[in-house]
Image (spheres, rainbow, N blue to C red):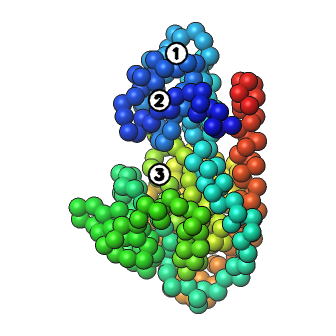
Amino acid sequence: MLAKLDDTFKRFNWMLDNGITNSAEVIQKDGGIILIDSIQRTWWDQFQLSVEGVDKQLLVFACNMPRHWVTNKNITLVNLHRILRYTLDDLSPQIKYWRFDHFNRQVDLFTHDFFMTFGNGEYYREACVAELEDMGVLDRSLYSRPATDTRPARSIENVGEAMPAEMRFDHSNNFQFMIRNTQRCHSAIVLSNEPFRDERCGHLNEKILWPILAQVPMLWAMNSHKRQQMQSWGFVPADTPRSDLRSFTEQLLWLRSVFRDSDRAQRWQDAQGNTINHNLDVLKGLADRIDEDTHRQLVPLGLA
């Protein structure tokens, strides 16, 4: 289905270029456009104004855009989950055949507090990670990050070395590495693009998959649109999701104190068992769920 759309409509990435005017021209000519990557609310409002008064149906294919953002009655929004769906295809053999046997986790075997991946430099994720580093949250954690002028890169295993591209994108071949390292930690942080920024929307990706596949409790650093999407699919985090960086940092500091006491840490870990099992069950059916939702949106448009 997605390949057919790519052959029919032109794709735009507003994060990389100022293509709003061009997008407006193309959608009036072709009847539809595909928006990939993150979208800022002000950009979207500018786009809607640029097609105001166009008296025809205009199809916009986006990813996880809030439907209340659409105020132009001639625009039909179709939300796709392209990146996540392709990743699920890439990992389908592991999801189907991997032996999931880590339900009974013993904290005495853990070597780190949190697992987290942060590959490409991006302002809001950088602000989040810098805050967690400054507050000492990540002192005993396995995580990656790009370098800045004042902070060294990290590649999960090495400080001063950025995570190589093949580690970030070759999910199938890196499956065992990611699972093994995630399982060394008490919990995993799902650091999504533009965390806690509700004026932006964008795709969910492989970061939501690793802790579920590793059967490790997960904590969400993401905006409300992505939290709502995760919850609508049925996923449950290890603790109540936070809506801003300060409360999220406080959440992690509290958990870090729990992890320092082996008895409390084991009780907390044991209490996650039902949630871990539930999230894995949801994940095993997620590809079909996304396909069904995509089909449901495309049928009325004659594009299924």
Residue toward you, 102 or 16: 16
Residue 247 x %, y %: 47, 61
Of the numbered discs 1 and 2, the one sitting upstream in the chain is 1
Where is residue 43, by image quadrant?
top left
Q: Which residue is mark 1?
A: 28
| Mark 3 element type | loop
Do we see residue 21 in this rendering?
A: yes
Could you tell me which secondary element the residue under label 1 belongs to? helix
> Which mark is on residue 44?
2
Looking at the picture, tell me which residue is in the foreground, 164 or 197: 164
Residue 193: mark in rendering: 3
If the image is split into quadrants, where does the C terminus sit? top right
Measure the alpha-carbon separation of dots 2 and 3: 18 Å
Specify which label sits upstream in the sequence, 2 or 3: 2
- Going by the numbered disc 1, the residue's amino acid type is Gln
**From the viewer's perspective, is residue 119 above or below residue 159?**
above
Q: What is the CA distance from the residue labelled 1 to the residue labelled 2?
A: 16 Å
Question: Residue 137's spot in the image, x, y percent?
Answer: 42, 73
**Numbered disc 2: secondary structure:** helix
Quadrant location of residue 206?
Answer: bottom right
- Looking at the rendered image, the disc whose residue lies closer to the viewer, 1 or 2, is 1
**Res. 49 in view:** no
User: Where is residue 204 drawn, in percent x and y?
Assistant: 56, 50
Residue flagged by tag 2: what amino acid is it? Trp
Mark 1 or mark 3: name the one nearer the start of the chain.
1
- At x 45% / y 49%, what residue is drawn? 194
How many other residues sit within 10 Å of disc 2, few (<14), some (14-19) or many (≥20)?
Answer: some
The reply to whether discs 2 and 3 touch (Cβ–Cβ < 8 Å) is: no
